[in-house]
Amino acid sequence: MSTADEHSVVPATALVPVPPEEQGTAAPSDDEARWRDAFRRATSSSWAVSIGAVILAVLAGSVMIAVTDPEVQKAAGYFFSRPSDMISAIGQAVGGAYAALFRGAVYDYRADDFATGIRPFMQSLTYATPLILAGLGVALGFRAGLFNIGGQGQMLASAAAAGWVGFAFDLPAGIHLLVAVVAGAVAGALWAGIAGALKAYTGAHEVIVTIMLNYVAFYLLSYLLATPGLLQAPGSANPKTPPMKDTALYPKLFGDKYALHAGFLVALGAVVVIWWLLSRSRMGFTFRMVGENPYAARVAGVDVRRKTVEAMLASGALIGLAGGTQVLGLITTGFGSDIDAGIGFDAITVALLGGSQPVGVLGAGILFGGFKAGGSTMQASQGIPIEIVLVVQSLIVLFIAAPPLVRAIFRLPQPGTRPTKAAKSAKDSKPAPSEKKGADA
Amino acid sequence: MKKMISAVALSATVALALAACGSAPDDEATAGASGTPSASSSGAAAASDFKACIVSDAGGFDDKSFNQLSFEGTQKAATDLGAQFAKVESDSSSDFPQNLQSLVSENCKLIVSVGFALSADTVKSANENPDLEYVLIDDAADADFDGKTDAPNIKPLLYDTSQAAFLAGYLAAGYSKAGKVGTFGGQPYPTVTIFMDGFKQGVEYYNKTKNKSVKVVGWTGEEKGSSFTGGFDANDKAKQTATQVLDQGVDVILPVGGPIYQSAMDAIKDSGRDVALIGTDADLFQTDPSSQPLVLTSILKKMDVSSYDAVTAAGKGSFDPTAYVGTLENGGVGIAPLHNFESKVDPALVKEVTDLQQQIIDGKVTVKSYLAK
């Protein structure tokens, strides 16, 4: 069981025949199955869909850059008199924008030497670090059928914990870092664990609970930051912590010239560990069983409640590591209540784009890190509003998640499947015999 | 697919048909603009290789407050100098280092950092790039409190707004019929409380000279017991705070902190009473026409003027890293005209305020603040 194929599409239900007497109470309704199917499809898109979504979103972004560019607008006014003006204006606007994105995210070809030119790529990897870690956390939740939308709250809780250890304690180098990182992971895990426990034992939906916990974390941190003697820097009236002690910082990987710190290695390590967990371990297999079909998992002897809590704890711990890299690697001069920098939500996109696969999350995280680094250069050199990058990111989510959702809303069949009589009666194309039986019952 | 193509074709045709009405500008007119390689360097760019750049804090350049004023001043200076200009808006504090770095890579000669939140990152960037010049708004860039900026190439722009708030406090105390005036702030930053404290001192000065007892609600002289909304958003919390202050019977209110004046306006409308509003930073009467029936005056913090001056000086090669402190004397802070309230305020009171301004400039009346020497 523990060496089950990662890409197995056979639903767990097919392996385990459901005893008829259990169906009366435990069988999922047609609606529920339909939505769970949509969720599963949206969160496990294939790499081809992901790449297509990125390309489409970038194209749509180009259109927006062209339309909002004042030179293009001017030239469009007399398009028929001299069409070449508009075409060259579009070329300049869009070409300039993506050239700036490349310069800010990958390699600055204007720089004098290679060491300076590669700096943007290092910056992209630095921004990618928390996105990869938090993306893994969200992806792990997805695989277990949980939508952890509380990344912001978990980031804030973990940043507060890791930051507090980072500036308030005197420990030897190395140990200090380790303690701070672990404190962050534990805080993130506990914050997510609250939502997991509420879901498992009261049925409260994790989306609602995690969103609410975001607010709790934000206002709690704001209070801690504004109260002298807690997280606020002594002698200052500003809601900001003191700087971290040097012993608690992630060491820089390639010297002070580059922002890249050892947190990136942690992220790479986490990719390997989560890959192993999901595809090679018993625990990961049970997570996936619960994600595919909790009813079948329960029948097969999996303690679904326990797995829900465990999955949320693991998800929160990963996001907690991300919060740790923010305060111990990126913003080491003290932080305020916006330390999460929207990563908790960006991580959802990263997980979607990565198809909830660890390696996919790694790629998606680096891509988004590049967007973040390059977006700043796009603004500085071409005057393109930072919102364009945000729009491209949002469109990626839309292109990936929308098709399964729209199909679920309008009860449309999955393309490529023939609407047979059986599928019609179940109004669901997914070949899951036990579910259909349940629906008909 | 076919349908989609025809839909796209149709909309393109419509767009082009609309575009057909225009006519191309003369070749000579466009030669200047299209001759330069990119849009950002078009226009008068060739005149100078100086490049003025600005980075905002999380508020963005459209905050009707310090980001916007500094942006306007910097942009105007760049235009007048014929220099290049670039801007970067920050979404959160984790963007600051990268945004500063982008501007350095874009060959900016001078970088304006708006707000104390950018202080640490600006110092770092300034030390790494000693041949560039930096202007930091609202912070002395002095994290070690040795009285000097932490990098020799940073010019801090500071504003002793307590002097202008003092005048507003005096005016409000004289105007108030209820004998109570109020204030509240966003968060207890020094740049916020300096307004509230100057206001309070002005009221107290009025009481002393006139032997009256006008009370100040919302600011006790320290953070404890004073009214703050906890943020700089015009939200329910801000409105509640404004209502709490209004409920204590004040008929003049001074909200300090960007857009929270909007919440104060809502609260005034709800109360149904006749309460005058005092604006901050810019002349609220001009920046927000909807406030015109309510605005008694505004406490001006002329970041547009001083950032313009600093950028212009740097553009002409005479960058001076000495800290600038805006005062009533040098016109860096001030009090706005009364506009609609001109007829409602006793002319004698207006004259007293004008005299008081001169007395502060002459040093006969002192206003305490963390910036006053």
Image (cartoon, coloured by chain):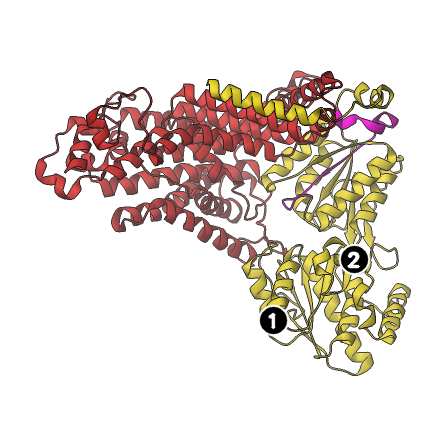
Chain colours: A red, B yellow
Q: Is residue B224 visible?
A: no
For disc 1, the chain is: B
Q: Is residue A384 above or below residue B226?
A: above
In the image, is residue B53 part of the stretch drawn in magenta?
yes
Check if mark 1's residue and mark 2's residue have beta carbons within 8 Å.
no
Looking at the picture, how far across and down is residue B253, in whole percent? 68, 68
Nearer to me, A426 or A139 = A426
Magenta region? B39-61
Mark 1 or mark 2, whichever is nearer to me: 1
Q: Is residue B204 above or below residue B19?
A: below
For disc 2, the chain is: B
For the N terminus of chain A, give its image quadrant.
top left
- Residue under label 2, please give it: B300
Nearer to me, A83 or A103 = A83
Q: Secondary structure at mark 1?
A: helix
Q: Is residue B43 above or below residue B190?
A: above
The tally of labels here is 2
| Amino acid of disc 1 | Ser
| Amino acid of disc 2 | Leu
Residue B213: image quadrant is: bottom right
* Left or right of A62 in this view: B82: right
Residue A426: image quadrant is: top left
For the C terminus of chain A, give its image quadrant.
top left
- Residue under label 1, please give it: B271
Nearer to me, A33 or B78 = A33
